[in-house]
């Protein structure tokens, strides 16, 4: 492994289909490294270079390059919000070189890879780990870094609904003290969607099914969205990510499932529990991962076949 100098190439990577925590912690950290004097910084994620609309204006977006534009032989690789190498797609082979690979993450299902792994399963978001490392490196928060970390923190905590530690609000206070506008950021991140996305949500929620006997009688509610649904409404896949929230609000079910078609017959599955099932274990069984109450995996087949895979695993993983 090589030593790292400020003039060396540094490649930052976050997970496929990036969310606010993946992009926010990665770009916030890149901005911090620039303040330390690093000059060769690139940030990327695997797959199609399609940054979800709500994150296009994030500070540090100038570091973003499509997957083929990533450094081929960087001295340092920093990985954000990635629980398993499978979430790195075609970028996973970069880990085989002699670069120092530092992983910042917060998934209980972290599989263990990289030269150094800074993984705290009790952290509310990867941005909590990023903030800690930035502070140890002596980087002072500024408004640009804070905006990135704030977006990351609010996306992964459901806008502070899932917070269990006062330290999360203490971090939020430090971020807000830099002068960022939480209301403006929340409006851009959570409350702005195209008209077609609302119409699409109406259809997808309208076809949800309630299965009261699932999960040992705790109940499951599920729905799905196809590529054709997206096309009909002229929408990008990211607009489906927020649909798990109304679905998990169904009182009659502990478990909520949204099955989203990525490409023909390949689905990204979101799982949520209110505490009656360990959905991280369910997802891990199906090749995915996540947290006890919020997890996901990639599935193949029809939505009915995907549900048939999940259903017995719910009974086997009651909390
Ligand atoms: P999501 O439903 O996409 O919001 O994801 C919920 C949680 O599950 C997040 O912590 C994700 O990192 C994790 N997750 C989602 N999909 C996968 C996957 N295919 N493999 C591993 N972890 C996943
Ligand atoms: Mn994530
Ligand atoms: Mn995260």
Image (cartoon, rainbow, N blue to C red):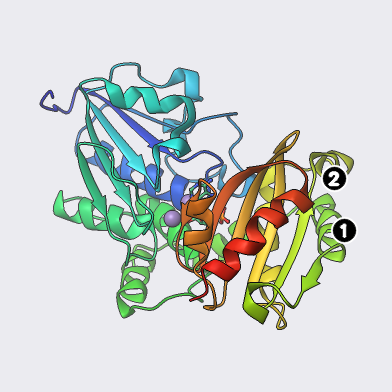
**Mark 2 secondary-structure assignment:** helix
Q: Is residue 159 placed above or below 46 in the rendered structure?
A: below
Determine which residue is flagged by label 2: 229
| Residue appearing at x 63%, y 63% in the figure | 312
- Between residue 284 and residue 155, name the one nearer to us: 284
Q: Earlier in the sequence, mark 1 or mark 2?
A: 1
Residue 266 screen position, x and y as percent: 69, 38
| Residue appearing at x 34%, y 39% in the figure | 79
Mark 1, other Cα within 10 Å: few <14 / some 14–19 / many ≥20: few
Say whether residue 188 is left or right of residue 21. Answer: right
**Quadrant into which the N terminus falls:** top left
Say whether residue 208 is left or right of residue 40. Answer: right
Residue 191 screen position, x and y as percent: 67, 63
Which quadrant of the structure image shows residue 109? Answer: bottom left
Q: Which mark is residue 252?
A: none
Real-space Cα separation, disc 1 to disc 2, in angstroms: 9 Å
Residue 159 screen position, x and y as percent: 52, 70
**Mark 1 secondary-structure assignment:** helix
Q: Is mark 1 within 8 Å of ligand 1?
A: no
| Residue appearing at x 35%, y 51% in the figure | 110
Evaluate if marks 1 and 2 touch, with contact meaning CB atoms under 8 Å apart: yes
Residue 109 visible in rendering: yes
Determine which residue is flagged by label 1: 203
Residue 191 visible in rendering: no
Say whether residue 35 is left or right of residue 300. Answer: left
Instruction: Count all numbered tags in the image, as a single digit.
Output: 2
Residue 146 screen position, x and y as percent: 37, 57
| Residue appearing at x 77%, y 60% in the figure | 223
Mark 2, other Cα within 10 Å: few <14 / some 14–19 / many ≥20: some
């Amino acid at each position: 492994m090589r030593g790292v100098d400020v003039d060396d190439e540094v490649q930052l990577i976050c997970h496929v289909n990036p969310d606010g925590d993946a992009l926010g912690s990665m770009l916030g950290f890149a901005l911090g490294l620039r303040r330390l004097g690093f000059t060769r910084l690139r940030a990327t994620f695997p797959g199609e270079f399609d940054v979800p609309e709500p994150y296009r204006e994030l500070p540090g977006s100038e570091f973003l390059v499509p997957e083929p534009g990533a450094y081929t032989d960087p001295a340092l690789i920093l990985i954000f919000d990635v629980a398993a190498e499978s979430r790195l797609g075609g970028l996973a082979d970069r880990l085989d070189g002699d670069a120092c690979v530092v992983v910042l993450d917060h998934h209980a299902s972290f599989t263990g890879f990289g030269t150094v792994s800074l993984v705290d399963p009790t952290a509310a978001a990867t941005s909590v780990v990023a903030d800690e490392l930035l502070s140890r490196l002596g980087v002072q928060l500024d408004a640009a870094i804070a905006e990135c970390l704030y977006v990351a923190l609010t996306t992964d905590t459901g806008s502070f609904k899932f917070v269990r530690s006062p330290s999360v609000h203490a971090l939020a206070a430090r971020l807000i003290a830099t002068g960022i506008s939480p209301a403006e950021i929340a409006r851009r991140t959570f409350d702005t969607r195209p008209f077609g996305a609302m119409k699409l949500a109406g259809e997808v929620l309208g076809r949800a099914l309630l299965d009261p006997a699932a999960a040992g009688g705790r109940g499951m509610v599920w729905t799905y969205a196809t590529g054709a649904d997206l096309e009909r409404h002229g929408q990008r896949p990211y607009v489906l990510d927020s649909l798990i929230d109304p679905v998990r609000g169904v009182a009659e079910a502990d478990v909520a499932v949204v099955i989203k078609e990525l490409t023909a017959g390949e689905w990204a599955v979101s799982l949520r529990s209110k505490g009656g099932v360990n959905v991280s274990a369910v997802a891990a069984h199906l090749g995915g991962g996540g947290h006890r109450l919020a997890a996901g995996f990639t599935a193949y087949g029809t939505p009915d076949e995907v549900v048939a895979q999940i259903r017995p695993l719910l009974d086997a993983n009651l909390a």
